[in-house]
Amino acid sequence: MVFAKLNPRAIALGLGSIFLLAACSLGGSSGGNTQSASDVTVWTAWGGNELKAFQDIVKPFEASTGIKVHITTNRDSTTGIANGIAAGTDLPDIAPATTDPIQLKDWISKGAIKPVETALGDQMSAYVANTYPGLVNPPAGTTGDDPYIGIIGGKHYYLMIKFQVKGLLWYNKHLYTGQAPKTFSDLLAIDPTQYGAQKLFCAAFSSGAASGWPASDQLDNIIMRQSGPKVYTDWIEGKQKWTSPEIKQGYQALLQEVSAAHVYGGTNYVLATDFQKAGEGLFKASGSYKAGCLFLIQATFQPGLTSFANLTAGVDFDFFPHPSMGNSQFDGNYNGFYDNYAMYNNTPAARQLMQWMVTKDSQQIWASSGVGMSSNKSTTYTDPVFKAAAQIVTTGTNMLVTAGDYMPTDMRNAYWQSLLNVTSNPGSLDSELSHLDQVQAAAYKSS
Amino acid sequence: MSAERVTTRGQTVVGAGVSALDTLGYRLQRLPLHLVIAIFIAIWIIPTVGMIINSFRGVADMGNSGWWTTLFPPHGFTLASYQQVLNVEGVAPSILYSVLITIPATVIQLTIATMGAYAFAWMKFPGRNIFFIVIVGLMVVPIQMTLIPVLQIFKAIGLNGTIYAVWLAHSGYGLPFEVFLLRNYLGGLPREIFESAEVDGAGHSVRFLRIAVPMTLPAIASLTIFVFLGIWNDLLVALTFLGVSVYRPFTVVIAQLTTSLGGGWQFLTAAAVLQMLLPLAVFIALQRYFVRGVTAGSVKG
Amino acid sequence: MEQIITAVVAVVAVPLILLGYIRLGEAIIERLPDTLQAWIRPYFWALPAIGFATVFMVYPLIRTVFISFYNSAGDKFVGWDNYVYFFTFPDTLTSLRNSLLWLVFFTFFSVLFGLIIAILLDRVRYESLAKIAIFLPVPISAVAASIIWKFMFDYQPPGTTQTGTLNAILGAFGRDPIAWLINLSTNNAALIFVGIWSATGFCMVIISASLKGISTEVLEAARMDGANEFQIVRLIVTPLLWPTITVVVTTELINALKTFDIVYVMTNGAYNTDVIATQMFRQLASAHYGRAAAVGVVLFIAIVPLLIVNIRRFQQQEEQR
């Protein structure tokens, strides 16, 4: 009676599906991941020509060792790794480390991130000796830790791969024939129309979700030269008030650079335009002028941006170092921007790749790729721009990082936004700064 | 429907002045209707057309002139952006992998949601409203908040880093919205149909598969599109639950197109056009369910 | 090879398993005594949904409530500190105001446009084609949408060639260009419009699906009685669509509250365009889980009244059918 009511098709279907479920769960154990133990997984923020250059570095490594390197471009790798650490799931073997000093200490205390010393072994001292000192040694005159370059508890956690120098004064070589301005007031005294340019500066501060960072680079380079490394570092760490005279005079200098009198296109153009297009004004005629502007303040990656496409370094354009802000003791400060890698799984293959990435041979591939500077002192550049930038680093006394990148996210966001707001409305400077003080009071609380 | 009828009548009695005037009057009367529709379509389509046209232009052109200038000679069309996208390492397998993620995840969550919505709409059980409030309230929970605990669960059952984890995660995240929407449609079906089926001896599985599902087909079809799309365009869930797996869907792979400084953004226009194609095809394919009469007028409406 | 096996498993096995679950489950339940059947069956049908929701959402939600009372590292109970942080953060007031603007304008216009378009297109023969046009923005991700609208909002100095569509149109009328995303009086409206532009297709499709369920006889009968089209829409169609409109409004209200990606990719909250969700994301990105959780809990509590309205409506629906 009971079984007569059962539909045979239902039973067949049910059993069949249970069988398939079993088959599928068996497949699951090996389903997602076919990499073998000798492979290396790498997460990177790079894409386009940067990724191409990195792949060029990895290829000879794969060929000589037989190790397969799986590279995934992950723009949010810090969150991915933080989630992985919190949940205890697999981490990539190699990926950039967080730049937040508090988070970095947390990762170290959980044993998630392995020291560079472990990765490089007996090659560690050679690496430190071959790398620009600003990237691997604490600032001159201090010893011990420097979280801004990943030194915690006497150990290095960032493997310095490549870097850029920020705060350079780019110009059109066909247009500007004068001397390098030595000081900020020399710079402001230049009459752009004498050289056929409409305004002194070009600027463009838009960058999607990160809008405002190009302005922050300009301000960072002002403050580090006006007030020195102590104020600068205190400011990053939330110990220097935004309303303090040091920070305020920095903002005021920036406002001179982007004032209606000095900047091409007006403030709305500066704010609405993507930073990649900022260089156009150096070469594009504006009305009766041969160009919109004479100078653009930007980093060594400027030649790679679209506005400098099809132009030749040293022929069409060149740069001057950032002028002094009138305080000669701080003239040796310069703004470096590095790309780091860290090791999360201590496997032989991962160690081998870490060791390969800092050899002179692999570093020379960076140096020749034109996408950035090698962290290795002894590599050679054919590009005159990088050659000159390397000179700044060699003669500079103090490498300082980009301030906003190391502030808490709330603070960084408010910082970038304040720059956009004061550019749009210079009269709001005081209220913007006291707003930043309020944010500072909240953002650095470690609840 | 009625427009068709009127027009044919007007044409068959050509010469009869009154009818011709009627037709003209009818057409004039409907002119504002077409006009309003045309305005909506223009506003909705122009931005996308701008992007599609720009995907066939060089980056210098995009910066120097508006997309509409390409419509006049010299056009300056180029396939450079598309070549760039198709040259990205691993782009072809990534499209297959996106399909492998999207189709099963869509099927799983729609089936489960339809079953759940059926229970909520047609069965009384203790705690029904509480369960429903909780499930629907979960729509507001941002996925980012759930990643760590779900990762822990996947790790515990050994699924992390597999495609199955991605299927299951998408199914979980999509459910609240689907249950909510489908309960509305299933709950609107007339009681009599189910009662007469019960009298005829049809069990719940028959009532569900032979009555409830066919009668809500337009709703299920429209939901399918949005479920499909949500998974197809997803980056976060794939990045998180595939973890260090070497398999990557299209959304992950195209991140290689742009540099860390945002250079190469122009290639994203071509990537976006390519990414739209399959969802658009699904929409067009499912459109046959969006016409009157699929449910044969049986829905009390 | 392995991928092909996965494909076969995916496409064949998944529907079979679920169908098998229904068939086999019902076959077993039908064997049971009636009282037990009535008790077990609802859970059998709802269990997969409830199970999935529990694992993926309820458990994380409970955990969220817990960690909202803990510090970032999760090792120290901090009481209401994270909530105090949210409500006293200097930018919160602006975020709340903007989220309110999104709630009202984004929801109202996306549903209204969706409704109007669905009703209008129901009356023309090129409906399928026109629907594709309105649907077109839906499959476009936020990143791609930001590029599209960059072409629309682009700004060049006054007096030079405008590359943005909107400013070119303004220029054609001899007006100065507007920096749409920067100007404080246009930027929130511009962002919300981008949201409406991408959400209207959803509202249209869902409302249209419901519209197609209204029987032709009802409409024909009204026309016979001499009702004009406006009366039919107002007195017959709209009331019949109310349940669906409520569902769509609820969905869009929740989406408005969760609005994140459009604002994030286009301004990230600059020029007073911040919303609650971008604020929360910032906390998550810097691993301040406690603070992010507190914002999440606030969002959840904010929609409870909305859910109660919906439950009431479903109860009405059940009484009437």
Image (cartoon, rainbow, N blue to C red):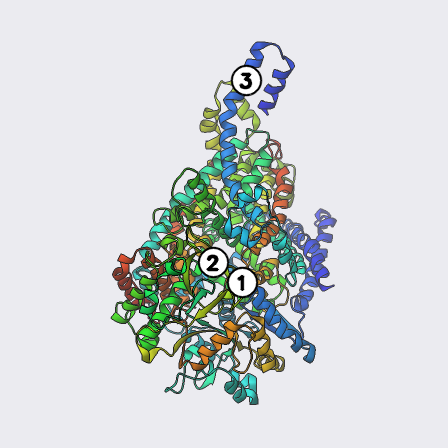
Residue B223 rendering spot, x and y as whole percentages: 56, 45
Residue A320 at least partly seen: yes
Tag 3: amino acid:
Leu
Tell me the mark number nearer the camera, choosing from 2 and 3. Answer: 2
Q: Do the residues labelled 1 and 2 touch (CB within 8 Å)?
A: yes
Q: Which three-letter amino acid code belongs to the residue tagged 2?
A: Phe
Q: Distance between the residues labelled 1 and 2?
A: 10 Å
For label 2, the residue is A283
Disc 1 residue type (three-letter): Leu
The residue under label 1 is: A311
Q: Do labels 3 and 1 share a chain?
A: no
Q: Mark 3 points at which residue?
A: B24
The answer for which chain carries disc 2 is A
Give whichever of B298, A181 is nearer the camera: A181
**Pointer 2: residues within 10 angstroms few (<14), some, or many (20+)?**
many
What quarter of the picture does the N terminus of chain B occupy?
A: top right
Which x, y percent locates residue A264?
Answer: 39, 56
Does mark 2 fall on the same chain as mark 1? Answer: yes
Neighbour class for label 1 at 10 Å: few (<14), some, many (≥20)?
few
Residue C129, quarter of the rendered image: top right
Quote the CA–CA distance across marks 3 and 1: 63 Å
* Chain for numbered disc 3: B
